Image (spheres, rainbow, N blue to C red):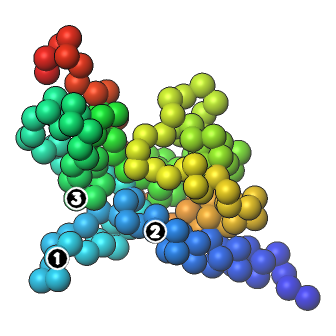
Amino acid sequence: STTALQQDQEKIKHGKHLVLTSACHDCHTPKKMSDKGPVHDYDRALSGHPANLAPPDIDRKEIEQKNLVVTQTLTAWIGPWGISYAANLTSDATGIGNWTEKQFFTAIREGKYKGLENSRMLLPPMPWDMYKNMTDEELSAIFAYLKSTKPIKNVVPAATPPVTAATGK
């Protein structure tokens, strides 16, 4: 019979597979330039938008009014909702290191920031409304894998609300 440790290892392995096939790295892993264009920087795997990277200098008001979307390093997006940044999903305290599995389920199933009931909604392009259809077993496996990742300290910037005509910013 399999031991509890073997079962945990299988769960983490399954979670890693789901993270890869669900394209979590596409947004949550910073990119680096290569001779083939931008590629995932796996030294910073799943650590979210780099804290030290300022938003691009663009006319946000025009972008938001035209319902366009601009991305930076594929970890930050500017659109009608403002600026959103890919979260740190690593096991570090600046990521999901202090989260409970219940918080993870709340984030994915209800689209709640940091998995907290009274928090704001997750912002585009996070497809939580698609991922919410994963089974409890799948989400539990993903959470187990994320909790097993290398902790990377990276405080992701807070989301920025949209520019309003009133402020003219």
Mark 1 burial class by Cα count in 10 Å: few <14, some 14-19, many 20+: few
Q: Residue at x 19, y 16 (%)?
A: 165
Q: Residue at horizontal 37%, vertical 59%? A: 27
Name the residue furthest top: 166
Q: What residue is disc 1 on?
A: 37
Find residue 86 and report its horizontal and vertical position in percent: 37, 50
Of the residues under marks 3 and 1, which one precedes in the sequence? 1
Residue 151 in percent (x, y) is at 45, 60
Q: Which residue lies at the image location 64% right of the left edge and 52% below the top edge?
A: 132
Is disc 2 placed on a helix, strand or loop?
loop
Inter-mark Cα distance, 3 to 1? 11 Å
Element at label 3: loop
**Residue 5: quadrant of the picture:** bottom right
Residue under the point 41% across and 67% down: 25
Q: Judge whether 59 appears above or below 30 on screen.
A: above
- Vertical side of 163 occupied by 145: above or below: below
Q: From the image, tell me which residue sits under label 2.
A: 23
What amino acid is labelled 3 in the image?
Thr
Q: Which residue is mark 3?
A: 73
Amino acid bearing label 1: Gly
Going by the numbered disc 2, the residue's amino acid type is Ala
User: Which residue lies most toward the bottom here?
Assistant: 1
Q: Quick check: can you spot residue 121?
A: yes
User: Could you say which is closer to the camera, residue 92 or residue 23?
Assistant: 23
Q: Of label 3 and label 2, which has the lower sequence position?
A: 2
Query: Could you say whether the residue bearing mark 1 is in a helix, strand or loop?
Result: strand
